[in-house]
Amino acid sequence: MVRLPDPEGDGGVSLEKTLAGRRSVRSYKSDALSLAQVGQLLWAAQGQTHPRGLRTAPSAGATYPLGLYVAAGQVEGLAPGIYRYESGDHALILLRKADVRPDMARASYGQGWAAGAPALLIITADFRRTAGRYGTRGEGYVALEAGCASQNIALEAVALGLGSVIIGAFDDAGVKAAAGLPEEEEPLLYMPVGVPD
């Protein structure tokens, strides 16, 4: 388990400034990300903010169907590999040592530039968690939650001086295989993150 640095509570950048600065970034410098930056991005997406386990992104009925992974390539303190974010511990669990960024980019319909980002943040869903409570409407609730989590990442990236973009056009089976995702989880999107070029 890799403990992440505690998230910052006040980065000093106004919400209005981050909203105005949010852009889709598809070209990144070769600079590595710090472990603190990665931890802050993950916390923004799914970090716990309440003793009862409530998180930064809203979840229908607090069912929390999302999984959050990092495909690390150039992150200080992390070997290249796939890591699962554990929000309760604000920590990463290494699942597999391998730089999967090129494989994920190849599964993304010509978006090879994604492999140039130092890290890819992957959002998955176990739809059963929400559908078990809300039936067929659960799928829409999961999509809403993924949208909130990904927007949180995008805004946190701006606040950290980084760039990101949401990638949703990919071969599901190819991304799932490249990242070695659990059978019960489906990839919804992933976000390359890095210093804008």
Image (cartoon, rainbow, N blue to C red):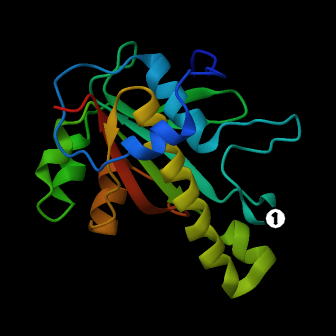
x and y percent of residue 114 in the render?
20, 46
Determine whether 54 is above or below 117 in the image. below
Q: Nearer the viewer, residue 84 or 166?
A: 166
Looking at the image, residue 123 sits to the left or right of residue 43; the answer is: left
Image point (32%, 66%), residue name: 173
Residue type (three-letter) at the residue carrying disc 1: Gly
* Residue 136 as seen in the image, left or right of residue 123: right
In the picture, measured across the screen, residue 189 lies left or right of residue 15, that is left
Residue 162 drawn at (x, y percent):
34, 31
Regarding residue 182, the answer to whether it shows in the image is no
Total tally of numbered discs in the picture? 1
Residue at image position (88%, 34%) is 51
Q: Please identify the quadrant where the N terminus is shown.
A: top right
Q: Residues within 10 Å of mark 1 (few under 14, many from 20)?
A: few
State the residue position of label 1: 61
Single out the residue that lies furthest toward the right: 52
Residue 105 visible: yes
The answer to whether residue 27 is left or right of residue 16 is left
Above or below 10: residue 192: below
- 23 or 114, nearer to the observer: 23
Quarter where residue 126 is shown: bottom right
Quadrant including the C terminus:
top left
Residue 76 spot, x, y in % from top left: 35, 14
Q: Is residue 2 above or below residue 148?
A: above
Q: Position of residue 158 (x, y in %)?
A: 41, 35
* Residue 164 in the image: above or below residue 36: below
Q: Quadrant of residue 35?
A: top left
Mark 1 falls on what kind of element? helix
